[in-house]
């Protein structure tokens, strides 16, 4: 009669012990990371502005970066890049700030997204009012937010005063387009409006007519 061979108990016990040690080590690492990162700060928390990256991005003490929400300033090498960066430095560098968040707190690059306040000064609005940036909205933007209304009002004021970017002469088009549901304004030759469906787009006789409604200039055709 054949007899069953017993499996060595030692190997099974060693495997369980190794797995248990690895699990404990993993838990220790996770707990340390949570302790270091901490909880996401609330809108009422205070931050100190440590560095200016450009006209719409800053670095906070601790290393977090904040992208000022709903505005867009010139990129490096473009006209008014230096002026926008210098203005943000003058208003915010080294100062204690408050951030109002809206929807997503971070973008795909890990940056915080929000409206920046130094005391009672609404920094996003100040940049737009000076003509050193455009209002730049997205589909998930709360268009009924009082903070967005302030930005649009500031942009209309900057347009009427011909300050900053609004004083730059541009080659005019006979018409400008915006696709239905889009928040971007395009020149007629832009690839984004090659196949417009009748009744599903808007026309504007000037770029200002489109931008004053809250549309933002397309980053490709740059109307």
Image (cartoon, rainbow, N blue to C red):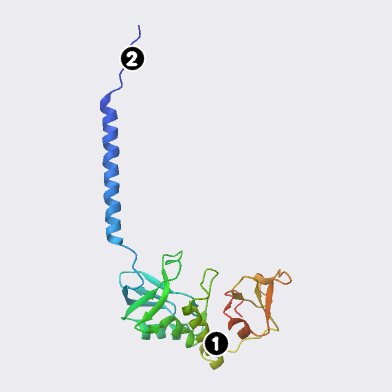
Q: Is residue 124 left or right of residue 194?
A: left
Q: Position of residue 106 (x, y in %)?
A: 42, 66
Q: Residues within 10 Å of mark 1 (few under 14, many from 20)?
A: many
Q: Position of residue 215 (x, y in %)?
A: 58, 78
* Left or right position of 81 against 93: right
Is residue 133 visible in the rendered image? The answer is no
The one of 220 and 197 positioned closer to us in this rendering: 197
> 165 above or below 139?
below
Q: Could you tell whether 219 is left or right of 187 in the image?
A: left
Front residue of 142 and 206: 142
Q: Residue at x 34, y 81 (%)?
A: 93
Q: Secondary structure at mark 2?
A: loop
Q: Secondary structure at mark 1?
A: helix
Q: Earlier in the sequence, mark 2 or mark 1?
A: 2
Image coordinates of residue 21 in percent, x first then y, are 26, 41
| Rendered location of residue 89, percent (x, y) | 37, 83
Q: Which residue is mark 1?
A: 156
Of badges 2 and 1, the one in the foreground is 1
How crowded pointer 2 is (Cα within 10 Å; few <14, some 14-19, many 20+) is rated as few
The image quarter in which residue 52 lies: bottom left
Please give the name of the residue rendered at 30% of the width and 52% of the height, measured from the top-left corner.
30
Image vertical order of residue 43 relative to residue 165, above or below: above
Give the labeled residue for mark 2: 4
């Amino acid at each position: 009669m054949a007899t069953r061979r017993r499996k060595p108990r030692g190997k099974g016990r060693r495997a369980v012990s190794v797995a248990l040690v690895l699990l404990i080590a993993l838990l220790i690492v996770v707990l340390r990371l949570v302790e270091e990162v901490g909880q996401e700060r609330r809108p009422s928390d205070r931050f100190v502005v440590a560095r200016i990256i450009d006209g719409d991005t800053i670095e906070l003490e601790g290393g977090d970066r904040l992208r000022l929400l709903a505005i867009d300033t010139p990129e490096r090498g473009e006209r008014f890049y230096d002026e926008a960066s210098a203005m943000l430095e003058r208003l915010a560098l080294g100062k204690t700030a408050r951030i109002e968040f809206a929807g997503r707190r971070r973008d795909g690059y890990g940056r915080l997204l929000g409206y920046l306040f130094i005391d009672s000064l609404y920094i996003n609005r100040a940049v737009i009012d000076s003509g050193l940036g455009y209002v730049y909205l997205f589909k998930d933007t709360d268009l009924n937010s009082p903070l967005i209304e302030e930005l649009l009002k500031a942009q209309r004021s900057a347009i009427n005063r011909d300050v900053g970017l609004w004083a730059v002469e541009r080659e005019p088009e006979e018409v400008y387009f915006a696709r239905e549901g889009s928040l971007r304004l395009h020149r007629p030759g832009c690839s984004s409006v090659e196949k417009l469906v009748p009744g599903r787009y808007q026309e504007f006789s000037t770029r200002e007519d489109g931008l004053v409604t809250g549309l933002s200039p397309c980053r490709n055709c740059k109307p």
